[in-house]
Amino acid sequence: MPKTIALVEDDAAIRENYIMALKAQGYSVNAYEDRPSAAEAFNHTLPDLAIIDIGLKDEIEGGFMLCQQLRGLSQTLPIIFFTARDNDVDTISGLRMGADDYLTKDISMAHLLARIAALFRRTDLLAAPSEQKDELKVGDLKVDVSRMTVSWQNQAVLLTVTEFWMLHALIKRPGHVKSRQQLMDESRMVVDDTTITSHIKRMRKKFVQLDPNFDHIDTVYGMGYRWQL
């Protein structure tokens, strides 16, 4: 069955343009022009991926509200903000709310489709059968790669798909510094430095909420990040 994408965009011309492009790639598309209609639909059925504008009709942060709703319904559903608002405050806010990516509308259609395909490649692992458990253990950290689950001190850590693969890249070789480019390569992302930093900060915060003494994700200034033993 084709993957279902929810597109939430209040500009009719833009909405129709992207509906056509996504359907041409074989995706099933459910489109919404405002937050209330999308919110009602999400309460009944979740898509496989959501693409959300931030400003929706008269709600200047309607997209942020939708993102929070979706994260409450699913921790792993891929969410992309696709907006004309190109500033660090909105980008960081969107990522902190749990979006997997933040794209501006000046990117090419090919670029957007590549990001969507990359997110679907990662989420497909959730449904892939696994005959044996593929688990990594580093101190109090346990990562089940086949199920894409993480626990710290036997408490579940609810990471997004992007956060999961960034963590996986860090713990494969504890103590070794991973540059931002290496994190992008190993987690199959193409994002800027600000986006990488925001993902790291949000991931670190989730561990700290479970363990106030957590300090294992180390920033090595000018070089990148590492999992500190």
Image (spheres, rainbow, N blue to C red):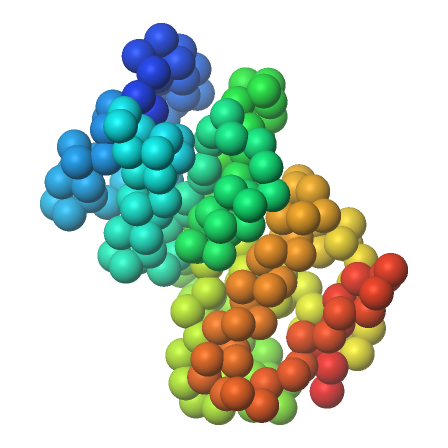
Placement of 81 over or under 20, stated as above or below: below
Task: Kindly indicate the quadrant of the structure image that contains residue 34.
Answer: top left
Query: How many numbered marks are there?
Result: 0
- The answer to whether residue 150 is left or right of residue 139 is left
- The answer to whether residue 55 is left or right of residue 178 is left
Q: Which x, y percent locates residue 15?
A: 34, 17
Name which residue lies at 77% across and 50% down. 181
| Residue found farthest to the right | 222
**Where's the C terminus, which quadrant?**
bottom right
Placement of 47 over or under 143, stated as above or below: above
Name which residue lies at 66% across and 42% down. 191
Q: Which x, y percent locates residue 88?
A: 60, 43
Task: Kindly indicate the quadrant of the structure image that contains residue 87.
Answer: top right
Name which residue lies at 30% across and 38% down. 62
Name which residue lies at 19% across and 41% down. 39
Placement of 136 over or under 158, stated as above or below: below
**Where's the N terminus, which quadrant?**
top left
Q: Work out whether residue 32 or residue 94 is closer to the camera in this orientation and state it.
A: 94
Q: Work out whether residue 147 or residue 98 is closer to the camera in this orientation and state it.
A: 98
Does residue 46 appear in the picture of this structure?
yes
- The answer to whether residue 75 is left or right of residue 149 is left
Does residue 127 appear in the picture of this structure?
no
Q: Which x, y percent locates residue 153?
A: 48, 91
